[in-house]
Amino acid sequence: MEDAKLILKGKEYSLPVVEGTEHEVAVDISKLRAQSGAITLDSGYGNTGSCLSGITFIDGEKGILHYRGIPIEELATKSNFVEVSYLLIYGHLPSKKELKEFHNQLTYHSLIHEDMKKFFEGFPPTAHPMGVLSAMVASLSAFYPEINYQIDVEMNIIRLLAKLKTIAAFSYKKSIGQPYIYPKNNLGFSADLLHMLFAVPAEEYEVPKVLEEALDLLLILHADHEQNCSTSTVRMVGSSQANLFATISAGINALWGPLHGGANQQVLEMLEVIRKDGSDYQKYIDKAKDKASGFKLMGFGHRVYKNFDPRAKILKASADKVLSQLGVNDPLLDIAKNLERVALEDSFFVERKLYPNVDFYSGIIYRAMGIPTNMFTVMFALGRLPGWIAQWKEMRDDPTNRIYRPRQIYTGNIGLKYVPIDKR
Ligand code: ACO
């Protein structure tokens, strides 16, 4: 494709143009500073491509999401989370043998070192499980150091995928004062996680199929979403060649924020506030439109989707199905549907293209499944792990990768002199 031309202070510069397989176009400005002394400015990286990637494709205008070229709708109905994890990390659908071997490895490595149980004991019962999760993941680096990149890293990928659910479940059990339930090798990935969360040693617990299927769907829908805040954090930290566990721990912390993965907890808390306030959802729509209130409709809006988030569409249907199968009649689901209906007709939301995002309905499903609100973002992290790993691996395996180092335009003071403290 023909180069782009930029005229800066009367001088013309040629900038190469890059085109992706879905015909997305980018102007490569990487040599611009060397040629002209100028950088590009893009606060919040809203229009900056930070990498070339073959993992996930999103068309936010059309509401399209593909993992490795396969539409999310197909994966959500035909695949399972372990297979999707393999697809994201290794770049292709596994054969029967590959999938069996991968599943066996995730089962075999799911125990955590017994010494790590002492770490859980040190946290207060009120600790947020996301803080515990990130601390535990960083701590894994003490048990499994990466000495040989090729050998240790591939194994650490498996270890992390296998152990994260055990860590998540242990942190939940600790927070409610129940004994830890160890992983069970005869269960599938999602069933094992639910078993570790809900079983108690005194009783037999069989994981209901409806819960297992609902969780698997939620994990698939969260598995990757290209260069969002947490994934870019993973690439940023990983670019310094920090080890896998330190890198993913940073991603978990980025996900925790209420504008990102923490929104699923906030949505539920918001719906609860509306319910306690007499279910007057119109009042909260008006509040969200009033900028001075500082209130946002949590679970609405997205940096990339300017059409319906395809994940939210799937989850809305799933919420109805799961709640009816479980016989749960949740007034929060009605409030959520009313909020969505009113917002989608309101010019404030229509003009700004604010649609429900993935977090809007996921919390309602988690709640119906019996998962406590403060564990919602942990469930998101479990789903997003294969995506983080795939993006990190893609970056590490790319010989052209360099440490991430954005530039800035300095707008502070100039030419000041130091004044000693007694003269200020
Ligand atoms: N409620 C009310 N108004 C909103 C909302 C909302 N949820 N989201 C955006 N707006 C408004 C903004 O005030 C802004 O209005 P303006 O143009 O008059 O100034 C306009 O819509 C554009 O919003 P920005 O904040 O510029 O959009 P940005 O891309 O920076 O932010 C974000 C996207 C963070 C998701 C935002 O929509 C938001 O805060 N949503 C609520 C939190 C949430 O649900 N986060 C989860 C996102 S999905 C995920 O990470 C898994």
Image: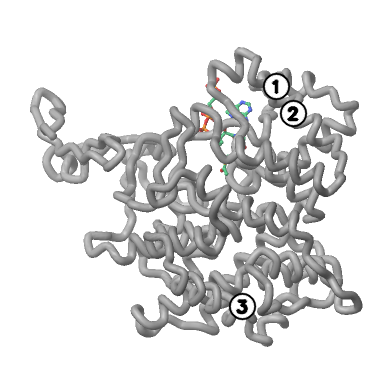
296 over 67 or under it: above or below: above
**Distance between the alpha carbons at the discs numbered 3 and 2:** 38 Å
123 over 79 or under it: above or below: below
Ligand 1 closer than 8 Å to the CB at disc 2?
Answer: no
Residue at left 60%, top 74%? 163
Q: Which mark is residue 362?
A: none
Crowd band around label 3 with a 10 angstrom C-alpha radius: few (<14), some (14–19), many (20+): many
Question: Dot 2: what SS?
Answer: helix
Q: Is residue 396 left or right of residue 329?
A: left
Quarter of the N terminus within the rendering: top left
**Distance between the alpha carbons at the discs numbered 2 and 1:** 6 Å
For disc 1, the marked residue is 341
Comparing 94 with 171, the one in front is 94
Residue at left 81%, top 55%? 370
- Residue 423: tell me if it is visible: no
Q: Residue 212, percent across and down?
A: 70, 59
Q: Residue 388, percent across and down?
A: 47, 59
Residue at left 60%, top 55%? 219
For disc 2, the marked residue is 337
Q: Is residue 60 left or right of residue 198?
A: left
- Counting residues from the N terminus, which is met first, the one under dot 1 or under dot 3? 3
For disc 3, the marked residue is 110
In the picture, residue 10 is in which quadrant?
Answer: top left
Identified by mark 3, the residue type is Ser
Identified by mark 1, the residue type is Arg
Question: Are dots 3 and 2 in contact, CB under 8 Å?
Answer: no
- Counting residues from the N terminus, which is met first, the one under dot 3 or under dot 2? 3
Comparing 46 with 377, the one in front is 377
Question: Are dots 2 and 1 in contact, CB under 8 Å?
Answer: yes
